[in-house]
Image (cartoon, helix red, strand yellow):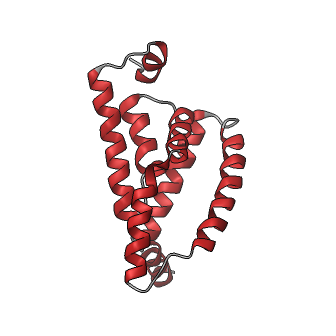
Amino acid sequence: RNVSKSIMKSNTMHTQELIMIIIIGLAAGVLSGLVGIGGGIIMVPALVFFMNYNQHQAQGTSLAVLTLPVVILGFLTYYQECRKMGTPIDLKVVVLLALGFLGGALAGSKMAVNVDKELLKKIFAVVLLYTAIRLLSWDALVIQWFKKTF
């Protein structure tokens, strides 16, 4: 059953659907506050796998969540703690990043709606895989292995 279609067709949500949505939001929020991720890395795959959203629906929903002031409490906590540690968050950088993000999100969303859902899912997976490889420093191991082998 396609949960996203059933939600759109009726104004009521089943308890199981409601609980799943809250769990996805909670997990994304906790990870966002903990390590600065959530929307794309947690929410999008969770909506695709657990709520049967297509890639376009999941990405659009994730972006919609960002339009709400849901991350302000996490930001304020980091802002206060960073100031206490003597490493304040530079609000000029925040504004400039936000402006770039705004333009990039507009351009990216216009491109994404014209890309096949399955291809978009694969592109998303490659971005996540590349990020994981870089964060785990496996790229350096592969380069070292390559240099020793050849």
Query: Left or right: 59 with respect to 104?
Result: left
Image quadrant where one finds the N terminus: top left
Q: Percent position (x, y) of residue 64?
A: 54, 40
Residue that appears at 32% across and 28% down: 18
For the point 70% across and 47% down, the residue is 106
Q: Quadrant of residue 52?
A: top left
Return the residue nearer the eye: 99 or 130: 99
Task: Tell whether 126 sits left or right of 99.
Answer: left
Work out which residue is located at the far bottom of the displayed protein and give it.
Answer: 86
Q: Nearer the viewer, residue 128 or 14?
A: 14
Place of residue 49 in the rendered image (x, y in percent of width and height, measured from the top left): 39, 35
Q: Position of residue 148 (x, y in %)?
A: 45, 84
Query: x, y (%) of residue 58?
Result: 50, 37
Q: Residue furthest top?
A: 10
Depicted 80 relative to depicted 112: above or below: below
* Residue drawn at the location 40% of the way across and 69% of the way down: 78
Q: Is residue 45 above or below residue 141?
A: above
Q: Quadrant of residue 100?
A: bottom right
Q: Is residue 19 above or below residue 131?
A: above
Which residue lies at the image location 67% right of the left edge and 36% below the top edge?
A: 113
